[in-house]
């Protein structure tokens, strides 16, 4: 009987020991240690539950505060800081354009802290066969695939402005009419930084002109643009790898 009780105690002890060791450990730069069950590791933060209350709330901690994570399977990750440098404000100027209904643009772009997303406000001159057809402004959102405000980018565009239309009736042409229109579309391109101050870009824009007045038909608009950009406001940003 005592032998069975002894075996039972040994088994329970082993199971408790495994349960205690089967946990993740978060080592903070402050020197503190958190015994946890890690739920999710994101780009900027880590989510976990306390090992003592796994049915409780999910806590979030910035990765910049973490030195190392040791997982229950024995593997570990050390979070290192990497500093990237770029300027968050840009002036973009198209210098060479092939287009049908535009646009030829000059724009202001504001980048987020990681350089992943740029919010661009353009002034667009729309041309067709060398003739003016419209003037718009709006918002372009550029997603930089590799971050750091450079490399390939893609994103939606939305422009609003006035276009010149004309009626056609046999051999008779009437005066141009200015009609307000909206132009939804998309951008795709590549940003090459020569330095923190200067850069080059090659990209394309495609959209569709939708007149507000029903008497006018819409038309496609596209362009292939080569441009220069000038960056302002030096910004240092730290990311965690």
Image: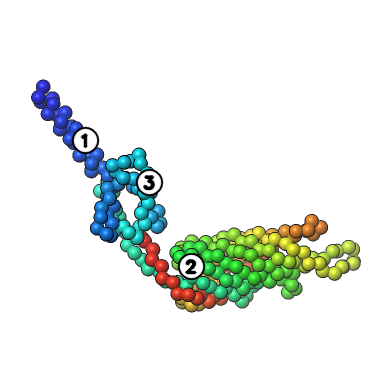
Give the color scheme: rainbow, by chain, secondary structure or one colour: rainbow
Does residue 205 appear to the left or right of 69 in the view shown? right
Residue in the image at 66% along x and 63% along y: 159
Q: Quadrant of the N terminus?
A: top left
Query: At x 27% / y 44%, what residue is drawn?
Result: 23
Q: Secondary structure at mark 2?
A: loop
Give the foreground label among 2 and 3: 3
| Residue 58: image tag | 3
- Counting residues from the start of the chain, the first of labels 2 and 1 encountered is 1
Mark 1 and mark 3 residues within 8 Å of each other at the beta carbon: no
According to the picture, the residue beneath numbered tag 1 turns out to be 15
- Tell me the quadrant of the picture where the C terminus can be found: bottom left
The answer to which of 5 and 190 lies nearer the viewer is 5
Helix, strand or loop at mark 1: helix
Among numbered discs 1 and 3, the one appearing first in the sequence: 1
Q: Name the residue: 32% across, 62% down.
A: 80
**Residue 31 shows which numbered tag?**
none
Spot occupied by residue 238 in the image (x, y as percentages of width and height): 38, 66
Residue 11 in view here: yes
- Mark 2 = which residue? 149
Badge 2 vs badge 3, beta-carbon distance below 8 Å: no
Residue at the spot 86% in from the left edge and 64% down from the top edge: 168
Say which label, 2 or 3, has the lower sequence index.
3
Question: Where, by quadrant of the figure, is residue 127 drawn?
Answer: bottom right
């Amino acid at each position: 009987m005592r032998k069975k009780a002894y075996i039972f105690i040994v088994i329970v002890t082993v199971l408790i020991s495994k349960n205690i060791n089967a946990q993740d450990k978060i080592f903070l730069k402050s020197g503190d240690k958190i015994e946890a069950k890690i739920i999710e590791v994101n780009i900027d933060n880590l989510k976990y539950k306390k090992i003592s209350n796994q049915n409780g709330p999910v806590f979030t901690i910035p990765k910049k505060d973490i030195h190392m994570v040791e997982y229950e399977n024995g593997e570990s990750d050390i979070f290192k800081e990497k500093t990237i440098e770029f300027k968050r404000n840009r002036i973009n100027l198209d210098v060479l354009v092939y287009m049908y209904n535009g646009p030829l643009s000059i724009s202001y772009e504001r980048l987020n802290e990681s350089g992943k997303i740029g919010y661009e406000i353009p002034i667009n001159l729309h041309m067709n066969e060398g003739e003016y057809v419209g003037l718009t402004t709006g918002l372009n959102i550029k997603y930089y695939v590799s971050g750091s405000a450079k490399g390939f980018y893609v994103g939606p565009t939305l422009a609003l402005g006035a276009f010149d239309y004309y009626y056609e009736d046999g051999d008779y042409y009437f005066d141009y009419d200015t009609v307000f229109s909206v132009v939804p579309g998309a951008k795709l391109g590549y940003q090459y930084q020569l330095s923190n101050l200067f850069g080059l870009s090659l990209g394309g824009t495609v959209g569709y002109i939708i007149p507000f007045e029903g008497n006018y038909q819409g038309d496609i608009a596209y362009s292939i643009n080569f441009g220069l950009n000038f960056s302002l406001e030096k910004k240092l940003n730290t990311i965690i790898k």
